[in-house]
Amino acid sequence: MDLQLSGRVAVVTGASKGIGLAVTRTLLSEGARVVAASRKVSPELEALGGDLVHVPADLMDPEAPARIVDRAVAEFGGLDILVNNAGGPPPGVALPRFSFLAPTDEDWRMMFEFNLFSVVRAVRAAVTPMLARGGGSIVNVSSGSARLPAPMNVDYNAAKAGLNNLTKALSEEFGPQGIRVNTVSPGPVRTAWWTESGGAADIIAAQAGTDRDSVIERVAPEMMSLTTGRLVEPQEVADVVALLASPRSAATTGADFVVDAGFLKQV
Ligand SMILES: NC(=O)c1ccc[n+]([C@@H]2O[C@H](COP(=O)([O-])OP(=O)(O)OC[C@H]3O[C@@H](n4cnc5c(N)ncnc54)[C@H](OP(=O)(O)O)[C@@H]3O)[C@@H](O)[C@H]2O)c1
């Protein structure tokens, strides 16, 4: 299937690793021109080549989202696609936390800055250039946890639930003018968040009295009742993001696509 992405201009946040890197690689391979934002460039991102510009940006800075969007317009003449992928634990934070009593006011503030307010600011900056092109596609990377409240990571889940609500509201306001807005909600994905030293797998391993690899291969899939029996791969999320970014999804807006290995059980 031709996704008709050739020549389209995309911004991807959190593009140096994990899901964002896979999205960037996929959009480039479909012929899109990509402005990739993260605090640091990674060797994997640098190796991609093609019509790719890296913008160093810390999304905890309220000015950063507009700067990233402005760069896309300056570099490539407009904007068609915005993938708000950066999110998860804010800088310096390790998840999971196991109780509502764990995060402080400051933790809550940082969680919402990173996972919700940075998206608000990016969308605000993106709407005008997208309307100038007659429309566009915004894909917000949320989480299955937005729909499954739990004692673990309450602040993260609430921020992502807000993101789902925001997405639907944006789709209503801007759909008539050609901007589609959707969420992709992954289950646990095999990225640095899980695999790095001190990451989620190590924290759960310490709690469960096991090791990182056992958590990734067995404990986490069991704990989260993953129907497929394994974590999601970043490319499996990226493929759905690319489809939603594409005009082939022209009738899809305000939707939440789960890519969650069967994590969510409700109809
Ligand atoms: N992995 C999962 O299990 C999972 C599950 C559900 C939903 N998600 C969602 O999927 C999205 C991507 O997660 P991931 O697991 O792929 O993340 P990841 O592998 O940890 O990568 C995070 C990306 O965000 C960038 N980043 C981190 N802090 C930043 C900041 N302050 N400003 C700008 N960029 C920043 C990182 O680059 P720098 O460090 O260089 O800035 C990196 O490119 C997030 O929205 C997350 O909530 C993930």
Image (cartoon, rainbow, N blue to C red):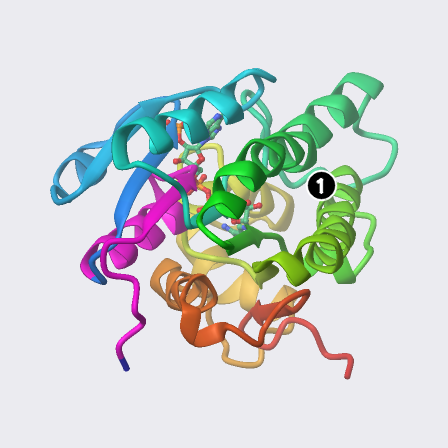
Magenta span contains residue 84: no
Residue that label 1 marks: 156
Q: Residue at x 35, y 33 (%)?
A: 72
Q: Quadrant of residue 105?
A: top right
Amino acid type shown at disc 1? Tyr
Q: Which quadrant is the N terminus positioned in?
A: bottom left
Image vertical order of residue 110 relative to residue 207, above or below: above
> In the figure, residue 95 lies in which quadrant?
top right
Q: Nearer the viewer, residue 136 or 260?
A: 136
| Point 31% across, 72% down: residue | 3
Give percent across and percent down for residue 77: 31, 36
* Along the line of sight, the residue nearer the viewer: 174 or 40: 174
Q: Position of residue 135 (x, y in %)?
A: 51, 55
Give percent across and percent down for residue 56: 35, 20
Judged left or right of residue 46, residue 178 is right
* Element at label 1: helix
Magenta-span inclusion, residue 4 = yes
- Is residue 100 placed above or below 208 in the rendered structure? above
Q: Is mark 1 within 8 Å of ligand 1?
A: yes
The answer to whether any part of residue 87 appears in the image is no
Direction from residue 49 to residue 53 in the image, left or right: right
The picture quadrant where one finds residue 197 is top left
| Residue drawn at x 64%, y 65% as measured from the top left | 223
Which residues lie in the magenta part? 2-29
Query: Eyeballing the image, is 146 above or below 230?
Result: above
| Left or right of residue 150: residue 8 | left
Q: Residue at x 36, y 46 (%)?
A: 10
